[in-house]
Image (cartoon, grey):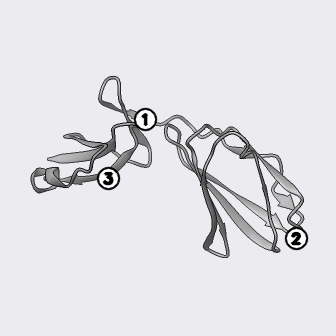
């Protein structure tokens, strides 16, 4: 028997597994459990119907993928929704993490190299883009 644990505020699937009996006690406040198959990367729980629905295609984009590494030249972030989680990696390490909200529409880069911007939306598929800072 497969199960999923989801966030009761957002519908984000927190984890999935099988044989839920011992795990029912491990559901934290603000979470609930459904006996259902799910893929947390591509699906979410519709809080109105308590059904597992597919995430929409990602709409995230940037206005350019090459930027000056001067801390001033900006990459504009587009197609984001409030609550989307943004992770920026440089040389494989997380250098910035934030939850998108008003005013979070641009990023700058201090050091030359390759940066990966990963977006984890609530109701859309995850996406990422590579930025080359020179």
Q: Secondary structure at mark 2?
A: loop
Out of 118 and 98, give the one closest to the viewer: 98
Q: Is disc 2 in contact with disc 1, using a CB cutoff of under 8 Å?
A: no
Task: Name the residue carrying label 3.
Answer: 15
Could you tell me which residue is drawn at 23 percent across and 54 percent down?
17
Task: Name the residue carrying label 2.
Answer: 134
Q: Is residue 11 left or right of residue 63?
A: left
Q: From this viewpoint, which residue is outermost toward the left? A: 21
Q: Is residue 3 left or right of residue 61?
A: left
Nearer mark to the viewer, of 2 and 1:
2
Q: Residue 76's spot in the image, x, y percent?
A: 80, 47
Q: Secondary structure at mark 1?
A: strand
Q: Badge 3, how many Cα within 10 Å: few under 14, some, many 20+?
A: some
Residue 72, located in which quarter of the rendered image?
Answer: bottom right
Q: Residue 2's spot in the image, x, y percent?
A: 19, 47
Disc assigned to residue 74: none
Q: Badge 1, how many Cα within 10 Å: few under 14, some, many 20+?
A: some
Residue 42, located in which quarter of the rendered image?
Answer: top left
Q: In the picture shown, does residue 133 fall above or below 22? A: below
Quarter placement of the C terminus: bottom right
Q: Residue 14's spot in the image, x, y percent?
A: 35, 50
Disc assigned to residue 54: 1
Q: In the picture shown, does residue 40 fall above or below 131? A: above
Q: Is residue 122 left or right of residue 28?
A: right
Q: Secondary structure at mark 3?
A: strand
Marks 1/3: CA distance? Answer: 16 Å
């Amino acid at each position: 028997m497969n199960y999923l644990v989801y966030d009761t505020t957002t519908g984000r699937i927190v984890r999935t597994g099988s044989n839920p009996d011992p795990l029912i006690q491990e559901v934290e406040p603000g979470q609930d459990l459904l006996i259902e198959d799910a893929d947390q990367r591509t699906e979410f729980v519709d809080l109105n119907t308590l059904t597992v629905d597919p995430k929409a295609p990602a709409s995230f984009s940037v206005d350019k993928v090459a930027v000056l590494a001067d801390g001033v030249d900006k990459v504009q972030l587009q197609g984001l929704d409030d609550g989307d989680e943004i992770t920026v990696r440089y040389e494989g390490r997380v250098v910035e993490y934030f939850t998108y909200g008003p005013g979070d529409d641009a990023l700058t880069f201090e050091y030359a190299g390759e940066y990966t911007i990963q977006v984890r939306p609530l109701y859309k598929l995850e996406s990422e883009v590579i930025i080359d800072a020179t």
